Amino acid sequence: MLRCFLLFTIALVTAVYADEDVLRPRGRVSGQTSIPQPEGLVHNPWALGIELGGSLSFYAQDITLHQLPDYETNITSGSGLGPLINLALDYALNDDMGVQARLGYDKKHYTLSGYLDAPCETPPRSGFYLPARLNQDYSQTINYWTGGLAFRYRFAENWLVIGGLTYHSLSNASYTETDTILTPTCQFYDQGGNPIGQRQQISHSNTADFTAARWSIDIGIGYRVPLSKNVVLLPRLNGQLFLTEVAPNNSASGFHQALGQIYSYTNRRLHALQLVVGIWFNL
């Protein structure tokens, strides 16, 4: 009898420590099951990311010539590279899909080079104008504060696509313009009417010339590189198609006191291709 009692006691203790839910009140409540959390961008559903990269901007404009058939220009397009930084938050809806919110700073930069015909007053300030050809180099920088929402979808183990809308709020803009007159009989004059030669450089802020707020559709593809259980490296290639023009029509200089309007600048557009590298952390 004693031997049977000891064997029963040993079996009972073994069962208790093997699964606390059998007899112990601090085990799982009867009928309760845990709900698995979705696999997030890193591991948990919430993730915080810091993104750095560059925007390759593509600028283009349409130019219409007025009044003077002998005038020409080929300054219609340009491109350039500028930096960007984002702070982003990601929430997993399930193992494959999630939503992201971003706040950032995006510097768009581009350059244009070419020739432009402009009226030249023959010296000495005769009031008689002839077309003079200028070689023009133009460098433009536009800075934006940005905010956006995007949808994320993982279509393979580590591959994903991200698409959404981004709002761009104009911060400031500045430019540098270098003009060189190629017509020997013409030169530039200062505001006092004094000749200053055949080359001039102008640098100025032109924030008011650009659209204050712009929207873009952003679509990109990225690849997850897990660095640890709680950290992921995510490079992605992103395209930006803007729904609004970068500047209103005729916001650039296209008028002359004596001859009136010579050029019209319309359909002024700026799109971008971005390469972004993000470091994402579990929250």
Image (tube, rainbow, N blue to C red):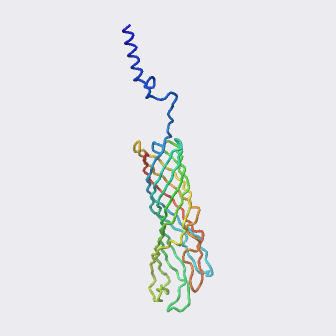
- Give the residue furthest to the top: 1
Residue 76 image offset from top left, x and y in percent = 55, 70
> In the rendered picture of this protein, how many numbered marks are placed on residues?
0
Question: Is residue 60 shown left or right of residue 174?
Answer: right
Residue 269 image offset from top left, x and y in percent = 56, 66
In the image, is residue 193 above or below residue 144?
below
In the image, is residue 159 above or below residue 189?
above
- Give the residue furthest to the front: 25
Q: Looking at the rendering, which quadrant does residue 75 occupy?
A: bottom right
Residue 229 image offset from top left, x and y in percent = 41, 42
Frontmost residue, 202 versus 101: 101
Q: Looking at the rendering, which quadrant does residue 3 occupy?
A: top left
Frontmost residue, 86 versus 184: 86
Quadrant where the N terminus is found in the figure: top left
Residue 255 image offset from top left, x and y in percent = 57, 80
Frontmost residue, 127 versus 20: 20
In the image, is residue 139 above or below residue 233?
below
In the image, is residue 174 above or below residue 165?
below
Residue visible at 44% across and 61% down in the picture = 83
